[in-house]
Amino acid sequence: MKNIAITKQVQDTLTADSVLQDLLEGNERFVNGNSQAVDNAALVSQTTGGQFPKAVVLSCIDSRVPVETVLDQAIGDVFVSRVAGNFENTDILGSLEYSCKVAGSKVVLVLGHEACGAVKAACDGVELGNITAMLDNILPAVKKASDEFDGELTSANKDYVAKTVEYNVKLTMDRIREKSPILKEMEANGEIKIVGGVYSLQTGKVGML
């Protein structure tokens, strides 16, 4: 039963490696149908005065990838920043910096997912309202996949989409380090890890890249 929220004292004892292992073990519990029982009322009460999450996850808005559920985390455990296509921008970088530098999180997990609709739209060059500008953030991954992939370069090609999803995660991680001296320094000092993974809609498993 998960009924004790993370405190500052507990957070201070955590390492990036131990937090990443905890997230992956949570995902294993989810996949195997063994997610922990949670006393939400107790956690709500304990976190009213503050929060000390162990990680921050940058994920897609996709309704099929509820982050806390698929990683088997509870109230107070993780920050979650969500945008279609799980890319970074100024607001998200600020959120990641707050999570780690100010609030003490140990891991930044960029979490893409199988058959991402935003990635598919970017692969197909979709233009529609504000979606057009949003998809521009994913185009570097589309180009990289296009340069290295043989075959049909549209969303009808599942392998091409999968490769673009992976590149989108990897390039997002690279840009986080490039655009955030704060996070880059924290990672260099061993205070945090910046990692990436792809969630399988079919199995529920997070595969690390």
Image (cartoon, grey):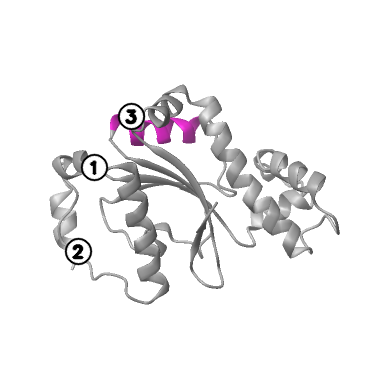
Check the picture and name the quadrant holding the N terminus. Answer: bottom left
Q: Is residue 92 left or right of residue 25?
A: right
* Amino acid beneath label 1: Phe
Q: Give the distance between the C-alpha atoms of the residues marked 2 and 3, in whole angstroms.
A: 26 Å
* Amino acid beneath label 3: Lys
Residue 2 marker: 2
Which badge, 3 or 1, comes first in the chain's sequence? 1
What residue is rendered at 28% in x and 45% in y? 53
Which badge, 2 or 3, comes first in the chain's sequence? 2
> Alpha-carbon neighbours of circle 2 within 10 Å: few (<14), some, or many (≥20)?
some
Q: Which residues are magenta?
A: 90-102
Whether 99 is drawn above or below 3: the answer is above
Q: Secondary structure at mark 2?
A: loop
Whether 148 is drawn above or below 161: the answer is above
Q: Residue furthest top?
A: 181
Residue 52 marker: 1
Disc 2 vs disc 3: Cβ atoms closer than 8 Å? no
Residue 101 marker: 3
What residue is rendered at 23% in x and 42% in y? 52
Q: Residue furthest bottom?
A: 33
Q: Is residue 78 visible?
A: no
* Amino acid beneath label 2: Lys
